[in-house]
Amino acid sequence: MKTFSMIILSVFLGWSGFAQTIKKETIPLKHGAHGGKRTDAFMQRWREYGLGQFIHWGVYAIPGGRWDGKTYTGAAEWIRSWSEMPDADYDNLYKQFNPVNFNAEQWAKQAKQMGAKYMIFTTKHHDGFCMWPSKYTEYTIANTPYGKDIVKELVDAYTAEGIDVYLYFSIIDWNHPGYYSGGNINGSPEIKKALREDPVNYNPFKTAAQREKYETFKAFTRNQLLELLDNYPAIKGLWFDGSWDAAWCKNAAWVDSLGVELRAKHEGLIIGSRFRSDEYGNRHTDANGILIDDYDQRFERNLPADMAETGGNDWDCVMTIPENQWGYHSDWSLSYVKTPYDLIEMAVKANSLNGNFVINFGPDGKGNIRKEETDIARKVGEWMAVNGAAIYGTQHSLLEKQDWGYATQNGDTVYLSVFNKPMNNLLRVKIPKSKTRDMVYVIEKAGFLPTKEPVRINGDGKAGSYYRDKTGASYYDIVLPKSIRDATQPFVIVIKLKEVDKKDRDAYQQALT
Ligand code: H79
């Protein structure tokens, strides 16, 4: 008979403070989440990054989404899976991989100028090609005309610029003879159900030989991960991908023990929720709804709408510049290409919801970062150089999302990042009621971030500029400074909040106006 322990969840409904108690069963798990939110300095540093860079680079950069005169409209790094491209052609591309223009220091400098605090690099994508000279396969950079260790060059160059490095590693490996796909657990309700109902007897393999060979793949994967940690001790974490396969999820116990081994080997190692599932095949969050590993990796090309959707967890969002191209694609006219301000808005939104935002780059087969990406990086960097305080080290603000943009917060300083400038140049800011009785928040100082020039708050100076609604929230109209009335790019107003006794509020407002 199954025994269930009970946990009590309190759900607060709305502003009234009315609490309802729900009883929820806790499912006993051996390989679910272990421990709560990390509080160590490594993870704290991760939380403060705000902005990162992803780089997808591998032999898929050579065809660049085109083969035999035809254009592949899917993601360029998936071209091997396209029926128009024979596997044998793809699997020989590495013999021509010679990125003579590759310059790791230049890439790192560009990332630094963009304002990236961390970088994620594809050591091995689904094709199985290794950008480092792995001793466990011949299919590596060592056997290309280029020959040098690209992972080492990048780890060294980025680390020298003060940018933390994370290694992307695909569990899917189309090159290893022991790799087996039991089907995508996300795309198949039948697999999900089978694994959930009988995880012990569920068998994703069709033959005993496949099952045996998968053991060689597991050993290979473990060896490669230990090798990466040995070779590149400066890295801060691993970014896994392609772990949605039934065969991998069926091995949840083994994957869990591998994670423990990796963490024991590398102090502070950060691993997201795409490494392993629980023993019932639940991914990202376990059967009890608790985040697996250090941060939620489910937000790919997609941002959570609000704090509720984040579940209060740490998370990152990795984003392509065109619609869905990670590796180099020679034709960017196939889809909408995001502007620097699209990306900046996403970055601010991500940070306002306690996430990190990561912009992807796909260098070409010669090692060039395309002009469009270089231009975008420069513009994002120019904005970050002036307004970065709204992103780095900030958190979800006590000010809710408002029509003009997003609020982020660092202590009592709130950054109002304005993406929709009001036509009347009055920025109406809603400040919630204090949770402490008889206390209210007032704006102690307000300024325009780039120049630090103070900005005025509209009002009659007597009652202050504020008015209150029935929730007790106050509204202030900030007069936008003349210098930004014609702004053609997003800007940041910074305010300092102070919690004061209700009866002192008018005095504060008078002092301000
Ligand atoms: O590395 C990037 C992608 O290649 C990888 N994750 C990011 C970080 C990724 N792998 N799979 N997916 C994303 C989702 C699967 C999409 C697919 Fe398709 C739909 C695979 C085949 C059909 C998109 C469209 C990719 C190829 C065609």
Image: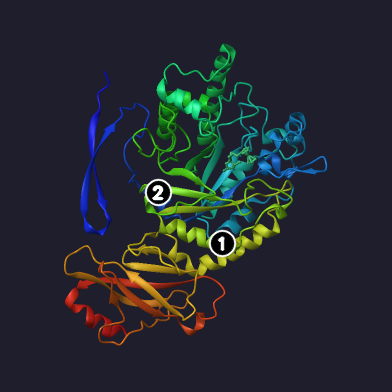
Residue 281's place in the image compared with 157, above or below, is above
Residue 380's place in the image compared with 227, above or below, is below
Q: Earlier in the sequence, mark 2 or mark 1?
A: 2
Coloration of the structure image? rainbow
Q: Are marks 2 and 1 in contact (CB under 8 Å)?
A: no
Find residue 380 and report its horizontal and vertical position in percent. 57, 63
Front-most of 166 and 379?
379
Which residue does the image show at 49% across and 79% down from the upper left? Answer: 423
Disc 1 secondary structure class: helix
Q: Amino acid at mark 2?
A: Thr
Q: Is residue 436 visible?
A: yes
Find residue 388 and report its horizontal and vertical position in percent. 47, 65
Within 10 Å of disc 2 (Cα), the crowding (few <14, some 14-19, many 20+) is some
Front-most of 467 and 34?
467
Q: Report how far apart the C-alphas of labels 2 and 1 lie in the structure.
A: 21 Å
Front-most of 265 and 415?
415
Left/right placement of residue 479 relative to residue 2 reads right
- Quick check: is the Cβ at mark 2 less than 8 Å away from ligand 1? no
**Which residue, given by chain and number where applicable, does mark 1 sit on?**
342
**Which residue, given by chain and number where applicable, does mark 2 sit on?**
310
Q: Is residue 233 visible?
A: no
